[in-house]
Amino acid sequence: QPVLTQPPSSSASPGESARLTCTLPSDINVGSYNIYWYQQKPGSPPRYLLYYYSDSDKGQGSGVPSRFSGSKDASANTGILLISGLQSEDEADYYCMIWPSNAVVFGGGTKLTVL
Amino acid sequence: EVQLVESGGGLVQPGRSLRLSCAASGFTFDDYAMHWVRQAPGKGLEWVSGISWNSGSIGYADSVKGRFTISRDNAKNSLYLQMNSLRAEDTALYYCAKGSRYNWQGDAFDIWGQGTMVTVSS
């Protein structure tokens, strides 16, 4: 199974933006896949945030604020979750996910700290 | 209110079996695929299995293939996971998750239950 690489941790201050990355292995082209993002707070189940394929093919989870958005950096073969206007409640673990075949692959997660 | 409630977890010895259940409410259950996703203590997420709306298509992670069986009863709005030949590495919090469409492949998990803990230990 391919491995999605997420930095273990990231931090930013309230009001700033956080850019969380999810790097695909070189044999999987990020341009060919939906990238799904989930948020998980301690003691709670994951929450679906959004998926991103392209600017014309993307979707927001129900009730998810528009300050959460997705994108891709094809040159880095990376999916990106951008959180703008950071709030203390955004402090959580964030997981990316793809379907490279008939099985799901999750990234290892990034713990976002809002300083 | 859309809700998923898992049950059936517990402490079980290696090699034994356990059956998990997930009761769904607040949405048209038979319109959507359903999934099981697990999370070992302090670890990340691992997809376990998915089933299409009518049970016509099913998928498993390699780590559980041949040992676990997913099923659903649309009349009872319920999802199940039969787990046989359990191993210590199956110890995890098992989440039931709703898919976003009919088929399980390429699906988003848009609603999650609170999970039921399975501990495999002698």
Image (tube, coloured by chain):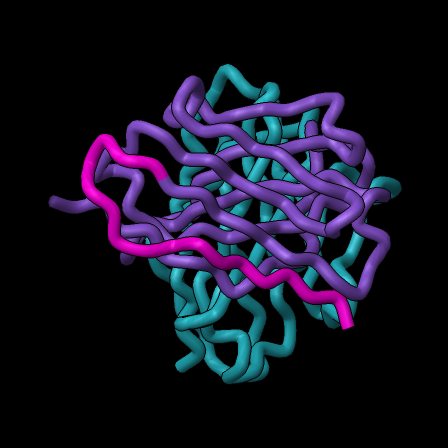
Horizontal and vertical percent position of residue A86: 57, 77
Q: Please state which of residues A67 and B58 is positioned toward the viewer in this rendering.
A: B58
Horizontal and vertical percent position of residue A13: 47, 80
Q: Is residue B20 part of the magenta span, yes or no?
A: no
Quarter of the rendering occupied by the N terminus of chain A: top left
Q: Please state which of residues B90 and B111 is positioned toward the viewer in this rendering.
A: B90
Horizontal and vertical percent position of residue B73: 71, 41
Is residue A85 visible in the rendered image? The answer is: yes
Q: Residue at x 82, y 43 (%)?
A: B30
Q: How many marks?
A: 0
Q: Is residue B4 part of the magenta span, yes or no?
A: yes
Q: Residue at x 44, y 40 (%)?
A: B46
Q: Residue at x 78, y 35 (%)?
A: B53
In the visual, does B18 lie left or right of B58? left
Is residue A76 visible in the rendered image? The answer is: no
Residue at the left extreme, as displayed: B122
Quarter of the rendering occupied by the C terminus of chain A: bottom left
* Quadrant hosting residue B27: bottom right
Shown in cyan, the chain is A
The region drawn magenta spans B1-17
The correct choice, above or below, for B118 with respect to B101 in the image is below
In the visual, does A50 lie left or right of B68? right
In the visual, does A42 lie left or right of A35? left
User: Drawn colour of chain B?
Assistant: purple
Horizontal and vertical percent position of residue A112: 43, 67
The correct choice, above or below, for B103 with respect to A79 in the image is above
Q: Please state which of residues B65 and A86 is positioned toward the viewer in this rendering.
A: B65
